[in-house]
Image (tube, rainbow, N blue to C red):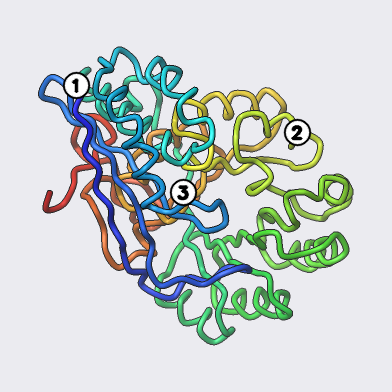
């Protein structure tokens, strides 16, 4: 195989703020794998919380370039298993390679990726659209600027209940709340009780990932379902989340790609948990890959291209929350100007 790396730094439409940080640009890395005249694309994201930067990701992948380029793709799963021992400390890098392998493999079959898996896309969930933390008037403006059936509202401020009440007065859309570890037990229980009558569907990762004892109490007492994010990173975390969360949010970038994500989905469902996939603000390359998992999911947050003012690729389109697949084999992503 031939390996090519494309670093990007894309601007957000608006400053993107969550409970622990703000940013105006999103650094991303796109990986291309080529074999026998076919090309597959994958993507991973820069993320300070996990100490991942694009230069570090490129360094890690380039260190294994000879192994990757000597490999002849049979199945994406076998490729992932072969590379996993080399990337045990960097699932972000492994994700980009795994996504590219899935895209390449499906193109070799002349099928869309979901067709390779034999999935029915007729009942796919709708994606939400994220409203980052801001002043309440600015959050209202962002909501009005982008009419949508489901919103994810980032919280973690002294005015969280007031924010939801004010936003609710401007729309009948479903709300999902994401506190990104900002609350404690009592605040979570209090907010869940207040939000239950305000059209909030669930709360994502209200408390720090290490507070398993607190999460057990919240799981048992909260008025709304609780979905894990920072507490569910890789496959081993799924079982641990059982009995502490009602569902999990799987980020392909964090868990190492589609290969482990499909196993995580199966395990979570076997435990009676809801399953979601989330965004790390990926462009259309990564988002197009996520789209093929939709038939497996209860919820999805794949609004990265909607939040960005720029893009890396053409691929899936999103209209009123509905995913429209590109009329191409593989994941459907095709780089722009490369």
Disc 3 and disc 2: Cα gap in Å?
Answer: 28 Å
Q: Dot 1, how many residues are within 10 Å of its Cα: few (below 14), some (14-19), or many (20+)?
A: some
Which circle marks residue 110 in the picture? 1
Residue 312 lies, with reference to residue 307, above or below; the image says above
Q: Earlier in the sequence, mark 3 or mark 2?
A: 3
Q: Residue furthest top?
A: 74
Q: Earlier in the sequence, mark 1 or mark 3?
A: 1
Q: Dot 2, how many residues are within 10 Å of its Cα: few (below 14), some (14-19), or many (20+)?
A: few
According to the image, label 2 marks what residue?
A: 240
Q: Of helix, strand and loop, which one carries label 2?
A: helix
Residue 161 lies, with reference to residue 117, above or below; the image says below
Residue found at x 74% / y 55%: 208
Left or right: 334, with 262 as reference point: left
Give how far across and how far down residue 33 sits, in percent: 23, 31
Residue found at x 37% / y 69%: 12
According to the image, label 3 marks what residue?
A: 126
Quarter of the figure with residue 190: bottom right
């Amino acid at each position: 195989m031939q390996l090519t790396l494309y670093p990007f730094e894309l601007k957000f439409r608006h400053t993107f703020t969550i409970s622990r940080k703000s940013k105006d640009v999103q650094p991303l890395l796109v990986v291309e794998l080529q074999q026998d005249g076919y090309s597959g694309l994958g993507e991973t994201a820069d993320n300070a919380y996990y100490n991942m930067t694009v230069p570090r990701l490129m360094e890690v992948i380039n260190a294994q370039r000879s192994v990757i380029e000597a490999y002849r793709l049979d199945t994406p799963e076998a490729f992932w298993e072969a590379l996993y021992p080399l990337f045990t400390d960097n699932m972000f890098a492994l994700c980009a390679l795994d996504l590219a392998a899935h895209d390449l493999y499906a193109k070799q079959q002349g099928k869309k990726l979901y067709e390779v898996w034999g999935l029915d896309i007729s009942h796919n969930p709708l994606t939400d659209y994220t409203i980052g933390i801001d002043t309440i008037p600015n959050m209202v403006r962002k909501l009005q600027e982008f009419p949508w059936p489901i919103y994810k509202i980032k919280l973690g401020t002294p005015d969280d209940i007031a924010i939801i009440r004010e936003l609710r007065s401007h729309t009948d859309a479903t709300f999902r709340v994401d506190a990104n570890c900002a609350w404690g037990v009592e605040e979570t229980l209090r907010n869940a009780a207040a939000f239950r009558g305000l059209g909030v569907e669930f709360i994502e990762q209200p408390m720090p990932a290490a507070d398993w004892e607190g999460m057990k109490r919240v799981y048992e007492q909260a008025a709304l379902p609780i979905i894990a994010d920072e507490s569910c990173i890789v496959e081993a975390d799924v079982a641990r989340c059982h009995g502490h969360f009602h569902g999990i949010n799987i980020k392909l970038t964090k868990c190492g790609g589609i290969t482990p994500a499909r196993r995580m989905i199966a395990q979570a469902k076997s435990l009676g948990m809801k399953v979601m996939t989330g965004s790390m603000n990926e462009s259309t390359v990564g988002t197009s890959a996520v789209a093929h998992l939709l038939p497996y999911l209860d919820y999805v947050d794949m609004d990265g291209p909607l939040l960005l003012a720029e893009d890396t690729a053409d691929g899936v389109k999103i209209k009123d929350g509905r995913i429209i697949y590109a009329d191409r084999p593989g994941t459907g992503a095709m780089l722009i100007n490369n």
